[in-house]
């Protein structure tokens, strides 16, 4: 199976894939909203994820940060998805919500946030683990500024989180990391 991803590119080489069209940001209609600069000290946009954030390392999420937004949102939510996963919808690797408006980063201390169920059916971060020989996969970290505080308990799945976010996104940002297994 030929992949539509090439090393170092942010978009598929020949246009949007079905996975791209099903990313949370697309489903929530975020493209027309203001953008937030989302960044990581661990990798640059379109660059390789650190090994520690993969199945071949410690499997811990990367540190993420962003700038203040005016007006300040009431809360933030983060969804990391792999649109290149060999399935009908992007694989949800990480759902984080209940992030207070004044917060500007997510690191290994997640005690104050709620984590949802990744597509492995587990709470927390599912490390990057593309099938060996499948080429580069993109891990799309999507941050959403919200005009509400989500009252969702821990352990929501991606569909329920998207339902709660719908109509409440004020701005958004995206950061893409790459990884492949030989």
Image (cartoon, rainbow, N blue to C red):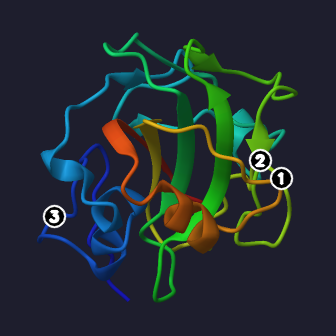
Gap in angstroms between the C-alphas marked 3 and 2: 33 Å
Measure how far apart labels 1 and 3 are at the Cα level.
Answer: 37 Å
Residue depicted at 63% across the width and 45% down the height? 150
Look at the image and tell me in which quarter the N terminus lies. bottom left
Say the numbered circle drawn on residue 154.
1
From the image, which quarter does the C terminus lie in? bottom right
Q: Where is residue 176 shown, x and y percent of the image?
A: 39, 42
Residue 151 seen anywhere in this rendered image of the structure: yes
Residue 54 in the figure: left or right of residue 136 = right
Q: Nearer the viewer, residue 156 or 3?
A: 156
Is residue 128 something that shows in the picture?
no
For label 3, count other residues whose C-alpha is less than 10 Å away and answer few (under 14), some (14-19) or many (20+). few
Mark 3 = which residue?
A: 13
Q: Could you classify mark 2 by the number of other residues whose Cα lies within 10 Å: few (under 14), some (14-19), or many (20 or more)?
A: many
Please give the name of the residue rendered at 78% of the width and 72% of the height, measured from the top-left corner: 120
Query: Residue 136 appears in which quarter of the rendering?
Result: bottom left
Q: Is residue 40 above or below residue 51?
A: above
Q: Tell me the tag on residue 87.
A: none
User: Which tag is nearer the camera, tag 3 or tag 2?
Assistant: 2
Q: Where is residue 132 in the image (x, y as percent from the top left)?
A: 62, 71
Identify the residue at horizontal 28%, vertical 63% (top origin). 26
Residue under pointer 2: 115
Of the image marks 1 and 2, the number of the one nearer the N terminus: 2
Residue 154 or 36: which is nearer the viewer?
A: 154
């Amino acid at each position: 199976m030929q992949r539509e991803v090439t090393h170092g590119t942010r978009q598929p080489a020949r246009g949007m894939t079905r996975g791209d069209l099903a990313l949370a940001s697309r489903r929530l209609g975020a493209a027309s909203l203001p953008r937030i600069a989302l960044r990581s000290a661990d990798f640059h946009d379109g660059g390789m994820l650190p090994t520690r954030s993969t199945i071949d390392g410690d499997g811990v999420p990367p540190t993420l940060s962003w700038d203040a937004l005016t007006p300040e949102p009431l809360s933030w939510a983060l969804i990391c998805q792999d649109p290149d996963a060999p399935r009908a919808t992007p694989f949800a690797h990480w759902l984080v919500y209940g992030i207070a408006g004044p917060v500007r980063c997510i690191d290994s201390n997640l005690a104050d946030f709620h984590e949802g169920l990744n597509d492995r059916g587990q709470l927390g971060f599912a490390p990057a683990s593309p099938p060996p020989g499948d080429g580069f996969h993109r891990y799309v970290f999507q941050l959403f500024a919200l005009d509400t505080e989500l009252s969702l308990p821990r352990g929501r799945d991606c569909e329920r989180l998207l339902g709660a976010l719908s109509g409440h996104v004020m701005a958004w940002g995206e950061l893409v990391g790459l990884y492949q297994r030989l």
